[in-house]
Image (tube, rainbow, N blue to C red):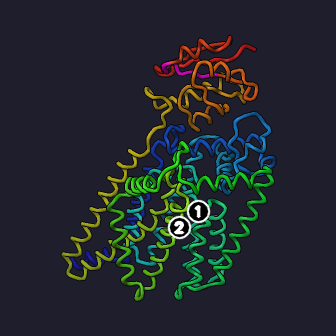
Amino acid sequence: MKKQLSILSSNSRIWLLGLFIALAFLSWSLFHDFTSPWVTNVDSNGAWWSQSVHNTLRAGLRATGGMPSWYFGPLPIPPSGYYTHHPPLLSLMLTGMYALFGEKEWAARLLPITFSLASLVLLWMLVKDCAGRRAAAFSALLFVATPMELVYGRMVNFEPIALTWMLCALLCLRRWEQTSQQYWHNLMIIAFLLTLWTAWLGYIFVLVVCLCFLFPHRKRNPQLAFLLLGLSVFSIVLFLLYIRWARQDAWQNLIEALNFRLGRTNATGTNVTWAGWALRMRKTLTSYILLLSWALGLLGTVWTIRRWKTDESLRWLGWAALCFFLQSVVYIMCFPNASYVHAYAAFYFTLPLAMMGGVAIELFLRWCEARNARWGIAGLAGAVAICVSLTFSGQRQALMLNTPVHILAWGNWAGLVPRLGHLMHEKFAEGTTIIHNYGWSPHLLYYAQCRPNPKHPLTPHDWAKAVQDPEIAPVGCVIWLGQANAREILAALPAGSREEINIHGIPFCFWKPDP
């Protein structure tokens, strides 16, 4: 039995198997059905960013300067069509993916999936360096058992990309502190820069890291702190000049977007009380992160604090977890609109909980082994059982959270959105403004390649007036015949072509004005 325990010791190479199991499980989860069209609520960002890349590829990189554009209409892209609220690196990387593989959904998803798998490896390497291979194995398993990672790990957005750069920056920082080699210092700076040009949250992360280098005595390094702060200021100034080149009102538009995110509003723009916001945060943090993961993370944090003065490696890992945790707290607290509307605002909590959860299991196993061999085997069996239970629970919860997008009140077939969108693209000319009587979504906009109606007519009289509005011409109508007043709307429309189409049992009418 002692021989078995030595094989399963905290730094045994056998624990590399934990990383491979975690990689296999995460790959299976993220690659499952990854060639499907944009049909779930998580796919909203994929549809938006795919439209941006679609515009970049058809207009040309030189004409757009790589600036994202959520625009539907004929070229050239007007200044108002450019999206200037975020750093452009994600859009540029996605443009490269579509240029290589074609404009396919799987090519877009491949980008965040690749980065999610890379984040898992980087997490394992960082924990292994600070707490041993066994702790790293359990941290990796806890990370992939989190519904937040399973749901948003393949979302085409900033989160999976920025997380990899942040982990890479910390790992290079650790290597540089250990070896003093300039090579690691340079890689660290590059990783921090990539973080800044991927997401605004990268600036919060860099600020938290800089504060840690300015004030605590143990990590005081003002030279590095001022270097990172200088890079942040330089990046912001360069970004402001970049977006001003695309549109003259970019700065005002950015300030308006910032003020909107600083407010407390829901998806419809209605103001939310702090109590309502707190309830939403509680639901998000307990739905997308399992309670057992929170408990393990808290336990690991307590044990890390108790060893803070005596274990340098564990203290370093605790500091890294603290950086991610503080960054997440600052983000969801300072930008309540973003955290209320988007559950993935809490995405970065997965890292500190996985780190500290792995530490909790490792220190528990050390305690068991110190008692006797039987306790060690029993403790290990319990730790494995916890990870297996979390994995199944996390996967089941992720499937429940990744819901299909609905544009109708009933009868919403899973493939309705792409099929309806392709038919709209086929029936209407590019740049047509579509008036509709059902729910809208970026998924449908992307497949239809038609402009959304800026107004939402309700009564048949409003419809008759809207189709003759010269400000939104040319105009077309797509009417879901299952709506209560659908026939009244059709009767109120002026003369034009009318084509009724049945999509898997769901009737629609396509109306176009006479030439």
Q: Residue 58 location, x and y as percent? A: 75, 40
Residue 484 position (above or below residue 162): above
Residue, disc 1: 201
Compare marks 2 and 1 and give the one earlier in the sequence. Answer: 1
Mark 2, Cα crowd under 10 Å, few <14 / some 14-19 / many 20+, is many
Distance from the alpha carbon under mark 2 to that under mark 1: 8 Å
Q: Amino acid at mark 2?
A: Gln
Magenta span: 477-484
How crowded pointer 1 is (Cα within 10 Å; few <14, some 14-19, many 20+) is rated as many
Image-based side of 128 in relation to 214, left or right: left
Residue type, label 1: Leu
Give me the disc on residue 369. none
Mark 2 in CB contact with mark 1 (< 8 angstroms): yes
Q: Which residue is mark 2?
A: 327
Q: Residue at x 57, y 49 (%)?
A: 156
- The quarter of the picture where the C terminus appears is top right
